[in-house]
Image (cartoon, rainbow, N blue to C red):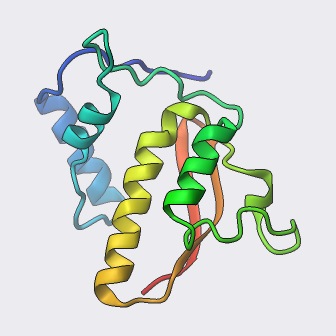
Amino acid sequence: MKRVYELVGAPGHCEEASFTWDAWMHVNGIAHAQDVTEDLWRRFQGDSGKTRFSDLEGGDMDARYDNLLCGRYPMIFRDRHASMQCTAMCWGLACGNGWFPLIDTLCAEIQRHVDAAQAPAVVAVQVKEKFGALRFYTTGGG
């Protein structure tokens, strides 16, 4: 069964959600996470005043968003049009348009870290939605 969620309304706090998130982090060995709720809230808020995260299901990202990400983060997506022998990025971003703000935020943070640490470039090798979750595979970095 595929689940698609639509969040409507202002960000808030829920004890059950915090407990679940903390448990998930513990089980998966995650020591630190950055809350990007406010950033996503500002990016998604539209004319209606509702925040909508409803375009998260399958399909490939539209060319306009694909091109925007490649333009903003040319080092991360430098292999976007390379051959399939080199990268899975040759098939594009295999996720819906609703993932754009999260990928944009992720890439901005990756690039900020690489620049600040003078680390080797991080290069995306595959970006896809699978089982309702975003998968972002890379090489390089520090």
Q: Is residue 91 left or right of residue 112?
A: right
Q: Position of residue 1 (x, y in %)?
A: 62, 21
Q: Is residue 27 left or right of residue 97?
A: left
Q: What's the residue at 13%, 27% (across, down)? A: 12
- Please tell me whether residue 117 is drawn above or below residue 46 in the rendered image: below
Q: What's the residue at 78%, 63% (across, down)? A: 81
- Image quadrant where residue 87 sits: bottom right
- Image quadrant where residue 127 sits: bottom right
- Image quadrant where residue 62 sits: top right
- Please tell me whether residue 110 is drawn above or below residue 26 in the rendered image: below
- The tally of labels here is 0
Q: What's the residue at 35%, 81% (across, down)? A: 115
Q: Is residue 29 left or right of residue 97?
A: left
Q: What's the residue at 41%, 89% (across, down)? A: 119
Image quarter where the C terminus lies is bottom left
Q: Position of residue 118 (x, y in %)?
A: 36, 90
Q: Position of residue 67 (x, y in %)?
A: 63, 49
Is residue 60 or residue 78 the one in the foreground?
A: 78
Farthest residue in the top direction? 48
Q: Is residue 9 left or right of residue 63?
A: left
